Image (spheres, helix red, strand yellow):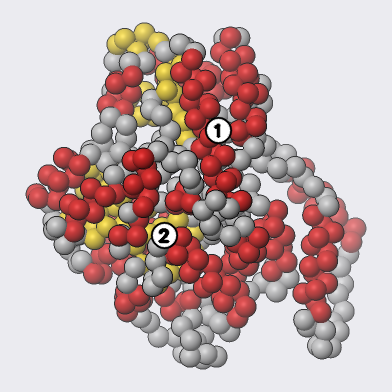
Amino acid sequence: MPFDPRELSTLDDAMRRLGAGFDRLPAVETHLDDARVRDALRATAERLHDNFPYQHPLYIGQMLKPPHPVARLAYALAMHINPNNHALDGGRASSAMEKECVAQIARMFGWETHLGHLCGGGTMANFEALWVARELAPGRAIAASSQAHYTHSRLSAVLGVPFVAIDTDAVGSMGMDSLERALDTQNIGTVVATLGTTAAGRVDPLVDILALCRARGVRVHVDTAYGGYFTLAGNLGYCTRTAYDAIGGADSIVVDPHKHGLQPYGCGCVLFADPGVGRVYHHESPYTYFSSGDVHLGEISLECSRAGAAAVALWATMHMLPLERGGEFARSLEACRAGALALYEALREDERWVPLAAPELDIVVWATRAKRASDASARARAVFAAAAKHDLHLALATFPRVMAQPVSPVEEWDEDHITCLRACVMKPEHGEWMPEIIRRLTTTLDSM
């Protein structure tokens, strides 16, 4: 994503149009010291040099996807009003825009009826889903796979709810035998199915999870904070596609627009299939909900003040790039997955690398071949550091022996875990850049 000053002229045009909507008001003098502002911004730009190049295709490490230019511009535009989407009094237009966006996201998963809202991110969204689950099934445990995001065990502790970790299979998806045993022996009220684990991008078998849970009256929450938008992609594998097609059978869903939804940070989304769960949120506020009889977003959210600009940015992006299969946005997701598959195939062709499993979405994980597990981990860390010197930025992740042993990256397991290299191929440009990425990766290893 280039730094393009031309965006400022587009923003200037939009700002003039925004100002025209308030031109009936008396003029207010502004006292802006251009020189001091320029100095502060230049100093800020200098400080921001101390970053990895998250916006560039050679950054392929963590889950850091640049916001779309229209999202950046719409956010900046909205900041001139600085709406608060807690109550309609503080964010009339932005609240309406949020509701429209959330309805479209729910429709993406097959829900015409729902309750939901935006929030600060996946952690807050999952917190609300688990809180509602606790209120509807008091005293019962929450279960998630051992490869689920750590936030579930931590939030369970915050909520004072027992947490049960479910073993995974050899590729890192939730193991059905382990889940069935836990459901039959533990007092579980909610099972979290992860569609797109943050470490390896694995997809839990949601159809089987739903069948086991429904037979026992257990709620199912789908955490697809990272991978949710891939439901629009047309190039998923059969098992992955089957899991995504079953999302509508869940009780609640979390997806993060600030990951694959092209938004700045501070934009998560939580959805509930049953609008009746709104009763769990009930509270009284004598001074915020007086301007309208419509439901205020703060009445169905644990958060109070929230940036209305996040909803405005999302609305503008979805206005330009609708959530539709076969559309421009869906094709960008397909490009990410195609890039991941290209990287996976290139790694398979070099005997010095050992991919753990074929990517289900756009995350690729691979080990370095070595005699011992400790040697492979040390070599992965060395490659990670050396690649950065070639301006190729990867990530590291540690996995249990059960996930790596089937592909035999080492001869001796002197440790029960192995550190691997990891790439989030989440920029559409990564497909075009993949030959260069592979060249730099190979050059890095050749030089060691």
Mark 2 or 1 closer to N-term?
2
The residue under label 2 is 109
Identity of the amino acid at label 2? Phe
Residue at 46%, 60% in the rendered image: 108
Q: Amino acid at mark 1?
A: Gly
How many discs appear? Answer: 2
Report which residue position mark 1 lands on.
339
In the picture as drawn, the residue positioned furthest to the front comes out as 326
- Residue 20, percent from left and from top: 81, 79
Residue 327, image x, y percentages: 58, 53
User: The N terminus is located in which quarter?
Assistant: top right
- Quadrant of the rendered image containing residue 133: bottom left
Q: Nearer the viewer, residue 388 or 18?
A: 18
* Residue drawn at (40%, 85%) of the image: 284
Vertical side of 329 occupied by 386: above or below = above
- 4 is higher (above) or lower (below) than 321: above
Task: Name the residue located 51 percent from the left edge and 85 percent from the top edge.
Answer: 288
Spatial CA distance of label 2 from label 1 is 25 Å
Q: Quadrant of the C terminus?
A: top right
